[in-house]
Amino acid sequence: MASRLPTTLRAFTRTAPVLRSPISLQAQRSFQTSRRQLQDAVPVAPVAPVVQRRPVGAFRGTLFGFLLGSVLAGTGIYYYVIDEYKVSNELLTEDIYALQAAVQRIEAYVKNLEEQVPKK
């Protein structure tokens, strides 16, 4: 190989080799690869079969959401109506008692007037 180089380069090849420090040897990159790295990766089969869950379909999810929302809204409205019914029932009972007291006062007033009016 030295015979094919030009004369100026032959002089450099005949001189004593340059000692390289261990740091410079470590700094050089190696582009070598082994046969194992060049081989294609072989996929590994899973050991246990994976059980896949079926995804919830759009129709089933929508139907379930609608029914759940309807039940919750119906329950809320039911308790609201029951509470309003109790309040209105109490108010009506109080009005009935007030009306009964007013009728009794009027009846007592009319009896008092009848006693005071002379009979003809």
Image: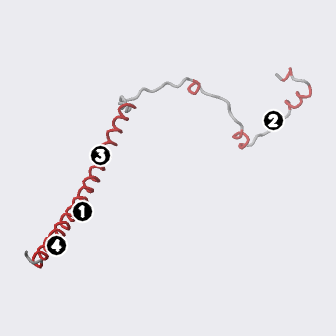
Q: Residue at x 73, y 41 (%)?
A: 24
> In the image, which is nearer the foreground, mark 3 or mark 4?
4
Q: Are marks 2 and 3 in contact (CB under 8 Å)?
A: no
Q: Is residue 118 left or right of residue 82?
A: left
Q: What's the residue type where badge 2 is placed?
A: Pro
- Labels 1 & 4 near each other (Cβ < 8 A): no
Task: Say few, some or many: other residues with alpha carbon within 10 Å of mark 2 (under 14 / 14 to 19 / 20 or more).
Answer: few
Type of amino acid under label 4: Arg
Secondary structure, mark 3, is helix
Kindly identify which residue carries mark 1: 91
Quadrant placement of the N terminus = top right
Find numbered disc 2 in the image and state the secondary structure of the residue it sits on.
loop
Circle 2 or circle 1, nearest the eye:
1
Give the residue number, with chain letter if any, for mark 4: 105
Point out the tag, 2 or 1, that comes first from the N-terminus: 2
Check the picture and name the quadrant holding the C terminus.
bottom left
Measured Cα–Cα span from mark 3 to mark 4: 46 Å
Say if mark 3 contacts mark 4, CB within 8 Å: no
Q: Are circles 2 and 4 on residues that touch, CB within 8 Å?
A: no
Estimate the spatial distance between the alpha carbons at disc 2 and disc 4, rounded to whole Å: 135 Å
Residue 103 percent coordinates (x, y): 16, 68
Query: For numbered disc 4, what is the local secondary structure?
Result: helix
Q: Nearer the viewer, residue 112 or 7?
A: 112
Q: Amino acid at mark 1?
A: Leu
Q: Which residue is mark 3?
A: 74
The residue under label 3 is which amino acid type? Gly
